[in-house]
Image (cartoon, coloured by chain):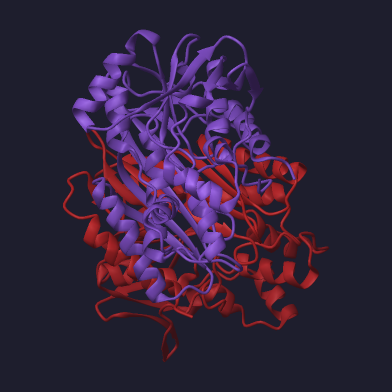
Chain colours: A red, B purple
Amino acid sequence: MTSERDFINSIQEYVQKYGHERESLIKGIGDDCAVLAKAGEDCLLLTTDTLVEGVHFDLAWHPPYLLGRKCASVNLSDIAAMGGQPKICLLSIGFHGAGQTWFDEFMAGFTKALEEYDVLLVGGDTVKSSNELIISVTVLGEGNREQIRYRSGAKPGDLVWVSGPLGCSAAGLELCRKTQSHSVENADRQQLVNAHLDPHAEVDLGIFLAACGLVHAMIDVSDGLATDLAHLCQVSNVGAEIQQDLLPVSESLEGAARELNVNVFDWVLKGGEDYQLLFTTGPEDEQKLRQLVTERFDRDIFRLGKIIDEQGVFLCNGTERHDISYQGYDHFSGQ
Amino acid sequence: MTSERDFINSIQEYVQKYGHERESLIKGIGDDCAVLAKAGEDCLLLTTDTLVEGVHFDLAWHPPYLLGRKCASVNLSDIAAMGGQPKICLLSIGFHGAGQTWFDEFMAGFTKALEEYDVLLVGGDTVKSSNELIISVTVLGEGNREQIRYRSGAKPGDLVWVSGPLGCSAAGLELCRKTQSHSVENADRQQLVNAHLDPHAEVDLGIFLAACGLVHAMIDVSDGLATDLAHLCQVSNVGAEIQQDLLPVSESLEGAARELNVNVFDWVLKGGEDYQLLFTTGPEDEQKLRQLVTERFDRDIFRLGKIIDEQGVFLCNGTERHDISYQGYDHFSGQ
């Protein structure tokens, strides 16, 4: 089957053909959000995502409350990836067989996540679906026109950063599949499961990073580091080298990888849905950025490598160097 | 299964709980669009709709170009129903098996319809669907805050109007089902088929009606007159009497009804997807409105009856009077 990227490229051609030459359109398709001019210095950010049962979630182990939270968070993460403040939300649900109790729990989770980010649910619709549950969410956000960060700002020499651990969601998904449950006995493993079932949108960090003036390009990791870094590099017309020994790998993730007989770096590099922020800064700003983030959020961020002139995303391990561009999760191929 | 209305009512409760008390939110769920304040006198209109294969369309007879047009039009119609100007659009497609050729034709129709209304496609995403094609569209529009019309403005004594014939889309759907084709030999029947496959969004008329100052309440007819008039009456806290002999029924529609052995009024009252505008005006403005619409658009509009104090939507035929509230098409029950 045609890959998701091919289809997105096709839509991009249509957008370039039909979405051009309007002063109000600052950025069309090809970033985490579309960006439109507003009055003054503000701009409007717009994003939409559809989650489909059997492709993006499995009701066998995803409790409706947590699925509701996740459907909100993955869309809020697109606003976070540009450093915007999410404001309002529309929800469209295609039902197949789910009853009122399921729906109430889903909505409780969905609205709770919105509430945590001070986002309003202002409308939507419900339709019948013939075979599967379909959840489509649109989020509008706002940002300062000068501060909003795009995928396209990376420069050779930049440092590549990620806001937190990667691969946890992929590991959690494997654990859910294996146990057919959302609950595992080991507390470390449960954290991985939770990372998959209830990911966090890095809204506050995204706003801070965009506003601090040090970040050149930003994206969220939804399809895996190998793919999302390739997106960022492609539109920035650069490449990247990632140092394997700089990748943040927790003991918990290594333990789960051993248990499930998986190469932990497959999860870290190719696993999707971690919703960490991936961004670049100038090489001179490493210490300043670490200090700012620690002061404000009391957390670590992780330097992974650097932006290079050569096209491609390369994983470096000692003297070895492999191109891993676009090797993340592709919903179309199911790989 | 729970009816669509029950689910929408449930979402309304959540929106009332979580979408209240913001100055920027003029109108949350419960109208054709959500309405948000913008700078100055303008407001932002927002609507989202999902169309699902096997529920809202059938690929056996719906050509991709016309389906693309329809997916745009049904969403533009929600903006038209409030008298707004559609501006930008997001598209999210869940694919199952459709290939590049199908997609190209769909996009050609979708973007052509947007172009006709000067609407920009600014973004979207593609996802894999496990069993069916899913098309989710979000449209943003703009309008003048004082001119935008809601469902809730109808007053007892008002005249009830519709912008054009009803039941054509329902008849066209029956013809497609019977022939399993988008093409029928008889030219009159083909017009009905076209009304189903490629409905027109009454954007220009909607803007004109909202701006002319005579219209009290407005909605588009997507689920059938019996249901959409009931929505308008319910939120206006009124009822309506429709005169059967005032319903616009074309000879073509009567011919198709005879041929298919259907009561033509079932199509006219209960058939959905005509996307005509349904609206009310003061009783004193009948001639003025007819004249304004004729001068500007060279077309007829149709007075159907009047708004009453009593709750319910009643069909009157001589001395007979039946409550037909919410007897339009319900995607959930499939009736």
Residue extending farthest bottom: A319
Q: Camera-side residue: B271 or B321?
A: B321
Picture residue at 54% right of the left edge, 37% below the top = B224
- Total marks shown come to 0
Q: Is residue A289 visible?
A: yes
User: Image height check: is A233 above or below A322?
Assistant: above
Q: Camera-side residue: B177 or B42?
A: B177
Where residue A50 sits in the image (x, y, percent)? 52, 56
Picture residue at 40% right of the left edge, 54% below the top = B194
Direction from residue B191 to residue B320 in the image, left or right: right
Direction from residue A197 to residue B166 in the image, left or right: left
Q: Quadrant of the C terminus of chain A?
A: bottom right
Q: Camera-side residue: B167 or B264?
A: B264
Picture residue at 32% right of the left edge, 31% below the top = B206
User: Image height check: is A82 above or below B290?
Assistant: below
The image quadrant that residue A305 belongs to is: bottom left
Residue extending farthest right: A185
Where residue A253 sits in the image (x, y, percent)? 66, 71
Q: Camera-side residue: A27 or A160?
A: A27
Where residue B215 sits in the image (x, y, percent)? 36, 18
Where residue A217 sits in the image (x, y, percent)? 32, 60
Q: Is residue A283 visible?
A: no
The image quadrant that residue A175 belongs to is: bottom right
User: Image height check: is B299 above or below B257?
Assistant: above
Picture residue at 33% right of the left edge, 69% below the top = A10
